[in-house]
Amino acid sequence: MTLAVRRTAFPSRVTVVVLLAAAAGLVFAHRLYRTAEISLSGAILSVISSYGVDVAADRQTVYFGLGSDTPLGLRMTPECTSAFLVLPLIAVGAIMIALRPRIQSRVLVALGVAALAVVVVNQFRVLTLVGLVSWLGIDTGYYWGHTLLGSMVSVFGGAAALVAFVWLATRK
Amino acid sequence: MSLDLVLGFTQALALTMSVAFVTYVLVIVVPYLRRKPAPIGEPSSLEWHFFVPCRDEEAVIGDTIRYLRTTFPIAHVWVIDDDSDDRTAGVVRTLKRNSGVRDPHIHLVQRQRPYARTGKGNALNDAYRTLKMWMGRRADADRAIVVVVDADGRPAPNCLEVCAAQHLFGNPRIGAVQVDVRMINAGQRQPGVSWWRRAFGAGLVRMQDLEFRTAIAAIQMSRGTTGTISMGGNGQFTRLSALDSIAGPTGSPWRGSLLEDFELGVHLLTAGWHTGFSLDTHVNQEALYSLRRFLAQRTRWGQGTMQCMRYLRRIWDSEHLTTLGAAEMMYYLAQPWMQLLGTLIYPIPMALMAYRFVVSPAEVVTWFFDGAWILFTVYGAFGLLPFVLWGPVYRARCVPVSFWRSIGYGLGYALYIYTFYITSWRALIRLVRGNNGWTKTRRNTDRAAGKVALDV
């Protein structure tokens, strides 16, 4: 005699609760997220930079170019973090899963890809800023990197992440 | 919660909403610009019934009936008189008598209080039931098409052959078709008012024409991909068998929301019907010159959209709608709520900047001229681009005006859209207060009107 075991998906209600908790966590524990984000920037910079790099985790700040003519510290402020760009995606993803549980896995994959894209874009923004400071000096490099290029990277990166999310979450 | 956190959160949310909207607009404008006319069909293969809901339309209904009977001799015209105080019914009877030669294609559906004036949906339901009785049980409901037209509506002469095409009602799965809407008074100035009001009114009418012929048409075309083309109240073609399938035991395909046309589309789509849209034909209607009347109309539409939020679960539960389709409908239904959120979110960064300016003006001035002005320019451009681009699109596809005038139209359209922030709040207040009754949108020549829908 064989027993037929019905394959059950992970309960969507649990997923929705976890996602909403994650969204709340991004708001209430944003300092922790920013620390992780700037630590990641520090790790990448240590690999690609020939000058010294140091992360002051308690201030969410990375110092780079240590030993060069243009040492500088960049702080990951609440205005610069990717946390609040990920948050709307999580909220929309949770709503979609709550309304159509059978697309749970698809939405989670889409959410993962889009969130990763947003994080990568923000890292790219930091690295662009560092590159411009090294190339053009602190005043000019920071001026263009932080104001214009940084904003453009955020806008186009955000658009790419949104398109990826919609495409992956809704494809048949 | 610190100010930095509030600023970071609101900036990110504003950026996400703006980027989502810019991306959406760019995605829909390309298919619109690439559109080519589709083949037409044979109107006599179908049976056509125009439904014209009226209340106090004595001034316009005669010309409308004459137009419909002359332009579409094979079609039936059903005038639904919602217990008018004027001679609307008398005009219809006179035309039906036709100087002694009775016109069998003109029909009057007479409603009477207290059963009249309970909303456009109920009026259309009355006409639907009357049509069913008139056709009898053996009628072919698949061949019969109901066309809803405003009392002053003018469907283009080619609309039956366009809608009879193989990809529209020639396809038995198509339950409804919406055609393009144009403003018949675009380019006409309102007589008998001051210069200022005349110029403002002409601009407002132009914006309504631009909105329907470009942005709304492009949205409808994109819905062809998502399978969620929605219905408008004017120029709406519906197969009778599709209406039958959603009419229920009371024989009421139209429901009670203030956006009964969109609601009808939701019921058809979730019942498994497909819907179509065509730019190859159109219906003309009169745009509003008065800002006050325009705001009242858009508040009603906003409130109707908010009411339709109750269909969200039904939409997502439907096996007939894809996830993309359901997401598109949710995005549409979320619009008034996002506008409410926008009025709260967008001013926060500006308010915080103003606060900092008051506390430390020199610091803010230095910050602005040191580079923040670039940010303002970038975000301003992204804020305006999705609206301004419809000006040149209107020039390219609809009305040949100079390039700079088209840019002016685009900038005007950006301002025009800001009225939705006002109407969404008005709609919310009405919704919260339970005010579901509505004053009919007054025509440009009307002086006053009563409610057409009652509070429930």
Image (cartoon, helix red, strand yellow):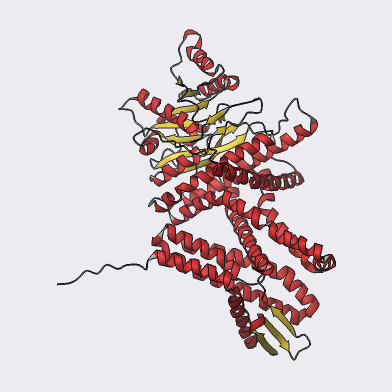
Count of marks overlaid on the render: 0
Give the image quarter of residue B348. Answer: bottom right
Residue B242 placed where, x, y %?
39, 38
The residue most toward the left is A1
- Residue A4 as seen in the image, left or right of residue A20: left
Q: Is residue B75 above or below residue B413?
A: above
Place of residue B182 in the rendered image (x, y in percent of width and height, measured from the top left): 61, 36
Q: Based on the displayed image, in which of its 4 quarters is residue A55 positioned? A: bottom right
Q: Is residue A170 visible?
A: no
Q: Position of residue B378 (x, y in %)?
A: 72, 61
| Location of the N terminus of chain B (image quadrant) | bottom right
Q: Does residue B136 sit above or below B357 in this rendering?
A: above
Toward the right, the furthest residue is: B362
* Residue at the top extreme of this rendering: B100
**In this image, B338 relative to B382: left or right?**
left
Vertically, is A41 above or below B401? below
* Residue in view at x 61 percent, y 71 percent: A82
Is B363 on the left or on the right of B72, as rendered?
A: right
Q: Is residue B312 visible?
A: yes
Front position in the image: B50 or A59: A59
Question: Up-down: is B382 above or below B253?
Answer: below
Q: What percent of the width, then of the height, locates residue B19? A: 62, 60
